Image (cartoon, rainbow, N blue to C red):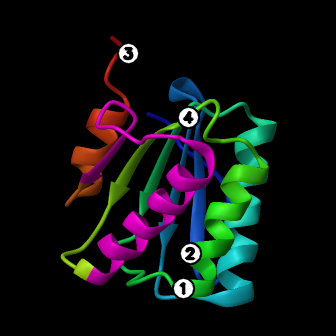
Amino acid sequence: MSMEKCYENDQALIEYDAGNQALILTWKYFVQGEKYRETLLAFYDLSEQKNIKKWCFDSREHGTIARNDQQWVANETIKRAFHINPIKTALVLSRNVFLQHSIDNVIETISTRTNYEANNDIYRIFKTREEGLEWLFEEDQ
């Protein structure tokens, strides 16, 4: 697996794995508002440019997602129609129940507004980056 660094700022690193058509976003610490959105916009833009099929969000260092940012993520996901062609997504989380709750809120908002239903085939949560990437890169059934 060879990763190419696509984007980096103070709060995050985005890497591209061409062989697996995957983008990996690693948060360095908690970010909200403009800085959070700036990073995700870069991530979403790269996803569209490179026709990405798989995402990994390594959020162990991030913490929770601010309520305004939860709404923004749901709106941006719908606007870009990522729910129509779902991207296989591995989320690497710490034991932070608040972050899990934030993510659940985003998914619920998208589901309510679009009739999209996330399932274990397309979206899973992991405790380690290695487990998440292993699942993400499994051969498609």
| Quadrant of image for the C terminus | top left
User: Cα distance, mark 3 to mark 1?
Assistant: 34 Å
Residue 2 in magenta stretch: no
Instruction: Tell me the residue that label 1 is attached to.
Output: 67
Closest to the camera, between mark 2 and mark 3, is 2
Which segment did they paint magenta?
A: 98-125
Q: Earlier in the sequence, mark 1 or mark 4?
A: 1
Query: Amino acid under label 2?
Result: Gln
| Rendered image: mark on residue 140 | 3
**Where 136 falls versus 59 (above or below)?**
above
Taking depth in this image into account, of 100 and 56 the one nearest to the observer is: 100
| Rendered image: mark on residue 53 | none
Horizontal placement of 125 versus 35: left or right? Answer: left
Instruction: Tell me the residue that label 4 is attached to.
Output: 86
Instruction: Tell me the residue that label 2 is attached to.
Output: 70
Q: Residues within 10 Å of mark 4 (few under 14, many from 20)?
A: some
Query: Amino acid under label 1?
Result: Arg
Closest to the camera, between mark 3 and mark 1, is 1
